[in-house]
Image: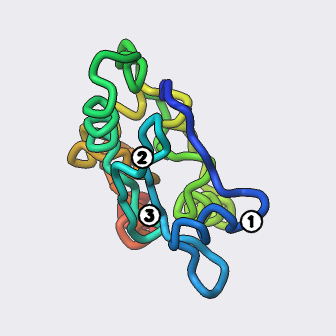
Amino acid sequence: MGGITYPLLSDFYPHGQVAQAFGVLRPEGKSERAIFVLDKQGIVQYVDVHDIDQQPDNEEIFRVLGKLDPSGAPARAPEPAPSPEPTADVVMYCTSWCPACRRAREFFKTRDIAYVEVDIGRDRAAAQRVRGWANGNETTPTFNIKGTIIVNFDQDKIERALGLK
């Protein structure tokens, strides 16, 4: 999980049980993107709820975790040494779970556009690059198309950068 060293809980099965318990399950059965930080006694100390397509501010979460246990183990591993950016006309920085990344993959597939995919959850140096382009956020997808950086899946901007418009 990208160097994170604290326990995480995800609400995959049974579907929605945790989201319902924390009051973030929508009536149609989907959840908001919600982050709850609990202390060692199980008391909720931090809540961040927003639209499912928005990426949370990881630095804020690390700050909250550091305040809960300032003398404990670090909330995350140190930043990695820089790794080179892949050489390709189209590089997509993504995660496996991102809905907009899925739409971008389909966009490239249906147009037979070759691209290199970099999972920022696994390549923390790439995540650091994305934060530099996206105002400190790990926003996915982020694209480097022939030197043009595009943050988020904006089909119009991508088509222009590829010379399709």
Which one is in front, 87 or 63? 63
Residue picked out by circle 1: 15
The label shown at residue 153 is 3
Q: Residues within 10 Å of mark 3 (few under 14, many from 20)?
A: many
Residue picked out by circle 2: 37
Image quadrant where one finds the C terminus: bottom left
Between the residue at mark 3 and the residue at mark 2, the CA separation in whole angstroms equals 29 Å
Looking at the rendered structure, the kind of residue marked 1 is His
Looking at the rendered structure, the kind of residue marked 3 is Phe
Image height of 73 relative to 117, above or below = above
Residue lying farthest to the left in this orientation = 135
> Are dots 1 and 3 in contact, CB under 8 Å?
no
Q: Quadrant of residue 35?
A: bottom left
Which one is in front, 128 or 105? 128
Label 3 SS: loop
Looking at the rendered structure, the kind of residue marked 2 is Val
Image quadrant where one finds the N terminus: top right
At 60% from the left and 46% from the top, the residue drawn is 9
